[in-house]
Image: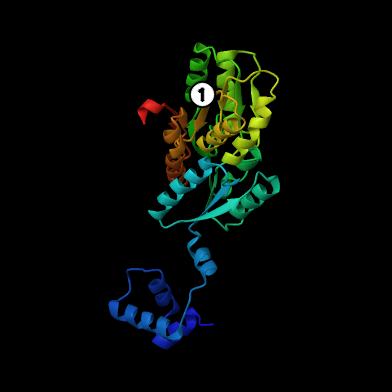
Amino acid sequence: MTSVSDIAKKVGVAKSTVSRVLNNHPHVSNKTREKVMAAIAELDYSPNQVARDLSRGKTMKIGVVIPHTRHPYFTQLINGLLDAAKESHYQLVMMPSNYDHELEISYLEQLRHAAIDALIFTSREISVDVIEGYAKYGRIVLLEDLKGHNLLSSAFVDRYWAYLGIFTQLKEQKLTNPALLFTRNNPDSATYRTAMAAYEAVFGEQEPLTFGGVNTYEDGYAVVEQLLVAPRKIDVVIANSDNMAAGILDGYQDKQVTAPLVIGQDRQLVSKHLGLITIDHKSYQLGKLAFEQVLSEEVSQKWLKSEVIRPDKG
C-alpha cells in the first residue's frame, strides 16, 4: 500500500510537504503541488480516512439517532437535515434505534470514542440526564424542550398552542369525547405529554381515550375496529398523521358506519385532497434548524410553532 513516505521519496520532498498538498494548504508552490499530485496519481495513493480524521481532530460526520421512518414526521425531518447538510462539508450518519436503550447508549459511546463529531437525537428512550453525561465529548442536540438542562442544545416545535386551539374549538362545538392516537401512548413521548397537557387545560380531569402504536394508513384503518367498540361513543379522532386519518376514514366507510370528525397531523398532501383539518408541525424546517444547532458553538434552545391548517386555507 502506497504511503505518504513513498510519495515524498519519489518527488524528493519532505512528508510534511505531501501532507500540505493533501490538505490543500496554501503554502506550497504550484510546481511542487503539480509534482506531488502527479506522483499521487501514478502510485494510486488513497489517503487513510481514519488517519486523516485523527490528524485534524474531526470526522466531519454527524450521527442522527432516529427510531424509525414509518411516520411522515421523521421522513420530512430527515429531508430537512439532508438539505441542510448538502450546504456543508458534513456527512450525516443515520443511526436507527427503534427506541432501544442499549442501541442509544452505543451511539453515545461512538461520540465518546470520537467516531463521530456530534449527535442529533430526533427522539429517545434514554433519559436526558444520561445523554447530558456525554455532552463533554461533542455537540448533542435534542428535538424537544429541555427545560432545566443547560449542557445540551435543542431544536423543537412548540405543539402546545396548536393542540390547545384544537381542543378549545372541539369543546365549543360540544365534541367532548375525542380519541387521541399516538406512536407511543405514554409519558416517555414528548408529543404525548404536550397533547395531554393541552387536553387537560381544556377538559380538566375527564380522561380521554388514547391509542398507541399507530403510525401508518394501515394502522389507521385497523384501529377503527377498536374505535367502534370503545367504552363511550367517540365524536372526534385526532390521528397521528394525515395518512393515518385517511386510513380511519376508509375504515369507517368500508364498515358502512358514519365516521366522527377526523383531524390529521403533519400537513401531507392527502389532507388537502380530503379537506381535513391538519396540524403542521414544521418537521422539514425543524430538520434544518436542528442541523444549524448542531454546528453552533453556543448551547441554546431554538423552536418553531405548530400551526393548525384548515381546509379553507389550502
State whether residue 127 is above or below residue 179. below
Residue 245 occupies which quadrant of the picture? top right
Task: Give the residue furthest to the left.
Answer: 30
Q: 229 and 238: which one is in front? A: 229
- The residue carrying mark 1 is 163
Residue 215 occupies which quadrant of the picture? top right
- Picture residue at 42% right of the left edge, 40% below the top: 285
- Percent coordinates x, y for residue 298 in the rendering: 45, 41
Q: Quadrant of the C terminus?
A: top left
- Percent coordinates x, y for residue 59 in the rendering: 51, 60
- Picture residue at 50% right of the left edge, 46% below the top: 75
Q: 164 and 11: which one is in front? A: 164
| Disc 1 element | helix
Give the residue type that dot 1 points to.
Answer: Tyr
Q: 56 and 122: which one is in front? A: 122
State whether residue 15 is above or below residue 262. below
Query: Does any portion of residue 235 appear in the rendered image?
Result: yes
State whether residue 183 is above or below residue 235. below
Q: Quadrant of the N terminus?
A: bottom right
- Percent coordinates x, y for residue 132 in the rendering: 60, 40
Task: Give the residue furthest to the front.
Answer: 256
- Percent coordinates x, y for residue 69 in the rendering: 56, 47
Coloring scheme used:
rainbow
Q: Is residue 238 left or right of residue 36?
A: right
Q: Is residue 271 left or right of residue 189?
A: left
State whether residue 140 is above or below residue 256. below
Query: Does any portion of residue 185 appear in the rendered image?
Result: no
Q: Residues within 10 Å of mark 1 (few under 14, many from 20)?
A: many
- Picture residue at 48% right of the left edge, 39% below the top: 299
- Picture residue at 67% right of the left edge, 18% below the top: 232
